[in-house]
């Protein structure tokens, strides 16, 4: 199957967003439905490319990098006045509320003249997609949330996690990627099955590329007491048929969190993939694609 890739940038609220079309060479405008891919925290759309290529016979696939991640870099303050205003902000995380990222997606779809799409979102991208499904249900045909779920608030655990995350995000020297086996070490907690070194290196490169404000700001807004309250409500309100794919050994968003989310709404179909962790689409590509395709066919989406 021959695929074509077309990359570009589009300005959304002052930030140049990177996006990429992956289509088959014989695809014409609006000849196929569109599937949009949302990546998770610290990553970029690059890890969705292999999945998009596999699905491109059925969809025109749109990948983009979330604001402040991957190739969608935040503009840097250039004047003393801009820097002062940034430091004096009363709520520095306000720009990184996940609802804002859902609105970014709506603006992107408007700019590309896309009225209705399919969505496949991963990890933190799944939380953004959950908001989008309820804010704009008329714009989504079907949704796939990969490694998503609900969690309970624990003040001590969350506080420790935020402090640790700040340290991790602050200490990201670019030379880390040059250390032998560092990419494997970096990815170990996310995987049950190892990935080729080239793929693991891509993840490390993306993590080092993420803007500090976006990386830390989204940690504070996505892993918070507020998120434990609004996220279950979002799952309850889904009207869009949704497949929730969980990795059996996922340590980041355990499968049980996905199971609890699926129990909140009959529109959600749960699929737990054995012998995978936080990246089932890469750890067991063939079975992941089969489950996604089966869901789309069952829901009469194709």
Image: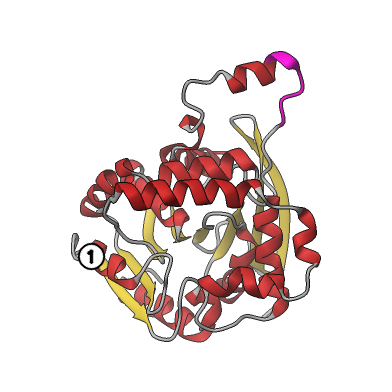
Badge count = 1
At horizontal 56% and vertical 18% (from top left) the residue drawn is 88
Compared across the picture, whether 287 is left or right of 8 comes to left
| Residue 133 in view here | no
| Residue 286 in view here | yes
Compared across the picture, whether 225 is left or right of 185 comes to left
Q: Position of residue 226 (x, y in %)?
A: 31, 41
At horizontal 50% and vertical 61% (from top left) the residue drawn is 35
Compared across the picture, whether 124 is left or right of 269 comes to right
Q: How would you rate the neighbour count of disc 1 (Cα within 10 Å): few for under 14, some for 14-19, many for 20 or more?
A: some
Judge whether 152 appears above or below 88 on screen: below
Q: Position of residue 169 (x, y in %)?
A: 61, 49
Image colouring: secondary structure
Corner quadrant of residue 255: bottom left
At horizontal 59% and vertical 82% (from top left) the residue drawn is 194
Q: Position of residue 175 (x, y in %)?
A: 80, 58
Quadrant showing the N terminus: bottom right
Depth check: 31 or 52 in front?
52
Q: Secondary structure at mark 1?
A: helix
Quadrant showing the C terminus: bottom left
Residue labelled with disc 1: 260
Q: Position of residue 21 (x, y in %)?
A: 65, 58
Main secondary-structure element of the magenta-colored stretch: loop
The stretch in magenta equals 76-81
Compared across the picture, whether 220 is left or right of 214 comes to left
Q: Is residue 228 magenta?
A: no
Depth check: 12 or 205 in front?
205
């Amino acid at each position: 199957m021959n695929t074509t890739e077309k990359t570009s940038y589009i300005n959304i609220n002052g930030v140049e967003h990177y996006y990429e079309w992956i289509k088959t060479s014989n695809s014409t405008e609006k000849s196929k439905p569109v599937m949009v891919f949302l990546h998770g925290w610290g990553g970029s759309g690059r890890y969705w490319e292999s999945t998009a290529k596999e699905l491109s016979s059925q969809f025109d696939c749109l990948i983009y990098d979330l604001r402040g991640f991957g190739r969608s870099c935040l503009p840097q303050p250039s004047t003393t006045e801009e820097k002062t205003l940034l430091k004096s902000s009363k709520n520095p995380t306000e720009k990184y509320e996940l609802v804002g990222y859902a609105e970014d997606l709506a603006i992107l779809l408007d700019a590309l003249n896309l009225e209705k799409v399919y969505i496949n979102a991963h990890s933190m991208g799944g939380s953004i997609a959950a908001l989008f499904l309820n804010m704009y249900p008329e714009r989504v045909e079907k949704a796939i949330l990969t490694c998503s779920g609900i969690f309970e608030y624990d003040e001590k655990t969350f506080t420790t996690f935020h402090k640790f995350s700040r340290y991790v995000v602050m200490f990201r020297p670019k030379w880390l990627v040059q250390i032998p086996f560092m990419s494997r070490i970096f990815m170990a907690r996310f995987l049950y099955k190892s990935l080729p070194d080239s793929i693991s290196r891509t993840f490390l490169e993306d993590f080092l590329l993420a803007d500090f404000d976006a990386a830390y700001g989204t940690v504070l807004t996505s892993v918070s007491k507020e998120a434990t309250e609004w996220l279950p409500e979002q799952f309850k309100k889904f009207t869009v048929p949704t497949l929730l794919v969980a990795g059996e050994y996922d340590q980041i968003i355990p499968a049980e969190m996905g199971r609890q989310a699926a129990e909140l709404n009959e529109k959600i179909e749960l699929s737990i993939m054995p012998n995978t962790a936080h990246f089932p689409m890469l750890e067991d590509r063939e079975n992941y694609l089969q489950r996604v395709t089966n869901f789309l066919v069952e829901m009469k989406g194709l």
